[in-house]
Image (tube, grey):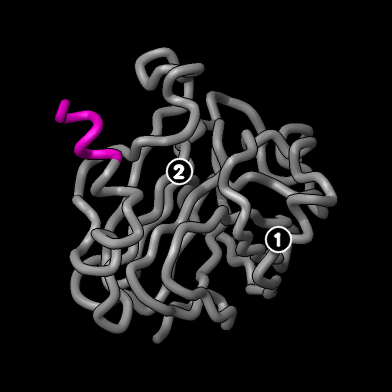
Amino acid sequence: MPVSALVAVVLFSPILAHSRPFPAAPACITMNTRQLPLEKRKSPLDSVSFTVGGQAVKVCYGRPSLRGRQMLGGEAVPYGKVWRTGANEPTMIHTTGPITLAGLKVPAGTYSLYTVPGKDEWEIIVNRSTTQWGEESNYTEAVQKQEIGRAKVKAETLATPVETFTIKPEPAAGEAKALVLEWEKTTVRLPLGK
């Protein structure tokens, strides 16, 4: 079996996903790497792996950069509108067991993560649909019907701007208690639990 096929099996096989942690590779295999190869993307694909209540969790996302632009609350990512929470494909969450994210119960499996940014508060959306391209126009009524749920979290202002969109667990080592989204001068913390 070719190495690329083996990686895809390890990442997406339901049997293997429940029996061992996800690999800590720097990037994820996605549904659109054939149409938009990783080396041709303006926004790199990245991932972060951590544990929540003993469950292995991996988040895969595109990392857009500011490049002198206003993004959050601007034309590209307006407040009050659904955002793919990154670039290219929607941000994806893979979990080997049940967790809670921003108070939402998320069973074992693979999900897309969307948000509705606001100046003071963000709406978090966890969705079962994982095959649509990330452009917000693809968040159709059919996709919306697959939502696990929505939750709201507070947005905070950063003293130092973050150039490239970043998702990270907090704390960085050990059991994660929050999933932190940072970009521009904004940070939001999504509480994590068992």
Q: Nearer the viewer, residue 111 or 65?
A: 111
In the rendered image, the vertical position of residue 65 relative to residue 191, given as above or below = above
- Give the main secondary structure, helix, strand or loop, of the magenta stretch: helix
Quadrant in the picture for the N terminus:
top left
- Pointer 2 residue: 61
Amino acid type for the residue under numbered disc 2: Tyr
- Pointer 1 residue: 146
Q: What span is in magenta?
A: 1-8
Residue 102: percent from the left, percent from the top? Answer: 56, 77
Q: Looking at the image, is mark 2 or mark 1 nearer the viewer?
A: 1
Q: Is residue 43 left or right of residue 151?
A: left
Residue 62: percent from the left, percent from the top? Answer: 47, 37
In the rendered image, the vertical position of residue 127 relative to residue 87, given as above or below = below
Give the farthest residue toward the top. Answer: 40
Q: How many marks?
A: 2
Q: Quadrant of residue 16?
A: bottom left
Q: Nearer the viewer, residue 6 or 160?
A: 6
- Residue at horizontal 55%, vertical 36%? 89
Mark 1 closeness class: few <14, some 14–19, many ≥20 residues within 10 Å: some
Q: Nearer the viewer, residue 115 or 53?
A: 53
Query: Between disc 2 and disc 1, whose residue precedes?
Result: 2
- Residue at horizontal 19%, vertical 50%? 24
